Amino acid sequence: MNNFDLHNPTRILFGKGRISDLDGQVPADAKVLLLYGGGSAERTGVLAQVRAALGDRKVVEFGGIEPNPRYATALKAVDVIKENDITFLLAVGGGSVIDATKFIAAAAELEGDVWDIFTSWGGAIKSAMPFGTVLTLPATGSEMNPASVITHAEKGAKLPFMSSHCYPVFSILDPELTYTLPPRQIANGVADAFVHIIEQYLTYPVAAAVQDGFAETLMRTLIDLGPKAMETPNDYDTRANVMWTATLALNGLIGAGVPHDWASHMIGHEITALNDTDHARTLAVVLPALMQDQRGPKREKLLQYAANVWNIREGSDDARIDAAIDATRNFFHAMGIDTRLGDYGVGPAEVDRIVAALESHGMVALGETKTITPDVARRILTAAL
């Protein structure tokens, strides 16, 4: 296992009714920019709860952040910050709203071209505004990590960045806020969290028994509770466990000291940039094809995954690997998620465009061993048609 530093300053306030704790978390003299997405936060009463908890603080609101948050929209929020002398940001929503808020928090304090945030993978960020989150959709883990992904529609790019300055100060996680989510969003959240775990697990052995065991438990939890979360939306215990699993999937703990892959994510981002397919659904397409293509380099971990996640312990090595890949694809199907590019209107011509986009964004040596070149990515995508 590699050496590692694990630093996570985000305070988690988990459980029913925790929105009321906002008053003790946001500075009393703060001028707050309240950021959210569409109308669901208003319709479900979440924004009303947030406004009440913020009390007499000056609050300016900024809505309309997209499911794949747009660069141009985020820059409008930066203008609002400067026009109103905002001192604290509060994101109410899922990963898209939180990701946008991270970029806004950094861009508001950056001198120079804010696009440098992406070309430097976050290295250009030297400070960011303080912000908190009220999570309404468990999926990305953005509520407890310093990473963000933003879409620049004009450039046809969906790019990530990471900075230690972009951890939320606090995050409120109330499972009851997820009761009214549409089944599609719950399915996407479960799939996204599952692939986050896989990206930090399905590489090669490094004698990290604790991280491996933790990751395997998280995956089994999603396999067990993901469908139940859709079948019984008001089951608090199910929703609470799914929410906490999604947070733990990408808060740095299971990935500490172990190799990471992230090729499925980088390829998936380009599919979303191409036609706005839901992020989680691009992962459900790419991951099984990548597992099949990389079954040689990933052989030992695939066999471990088959045994410890799916309880597949009989048959030849190849048969067990085949069964584990099939089980992964069937899990996505059980969540109502299609797993072929053709299901999302992507054909052979679009594969070339996706590969060209990977090359233009410098994604030419992906995976834990940096061996997924554009030609390998094309092979994976072609197998996923």
Image: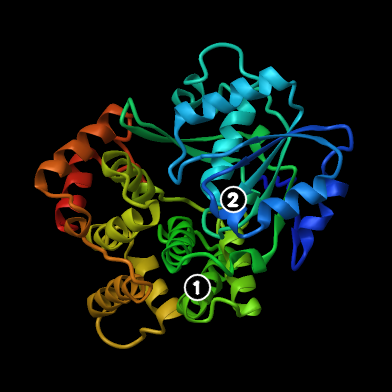
User: Horizontal and vertical percent for residue 180?
Assistant: 56, 67
Residue type (three-letter) at the residue carrying disc 1 = Leu
**Helix, strand or loop status at disc 2:** strand
Q: Can you name the residue that lies furthest to the top here?
A: 112
Crowdedness of circle 1 by 10 Å Cα count: few (<14), some, many (20+)?
many
- For marks 1 and 2, give the CA distance: 21 Å
Q: Residue at x 60, y 77 (%)?
A: 234
Vertical relation: 129 (above or below) 252: above
Picture quadrant where residue 362 is located: top left
Front of the two marks 1 and 2: 2
The numbered mark at residue 257 is none
The numbered mark at residue 222 is 1
Q: Can you name the residue that lies furthest to the bottom here?
A: 314
- 309 horizontally vs 176: left or right: left
Picture quadrant where residue 331 is located: bottom left
Image quadrant for the C terminus? bottom left
Q: Residue at x 65, y 79 (%)?
A: 237
Crowdedness of circle 2 by 10 Å Cα count: few (<14), some, many (20+)?
many
User: Horizontal and vertical percent for residue 150?
Assistant: 46, 36
Q: Which residue is mark 2?
A: 93
**Helix, strand or loop status at disc 1:** helix
- Identify the colour scheme used: rainbow
- 139 horizontally vs 281: left or right: right
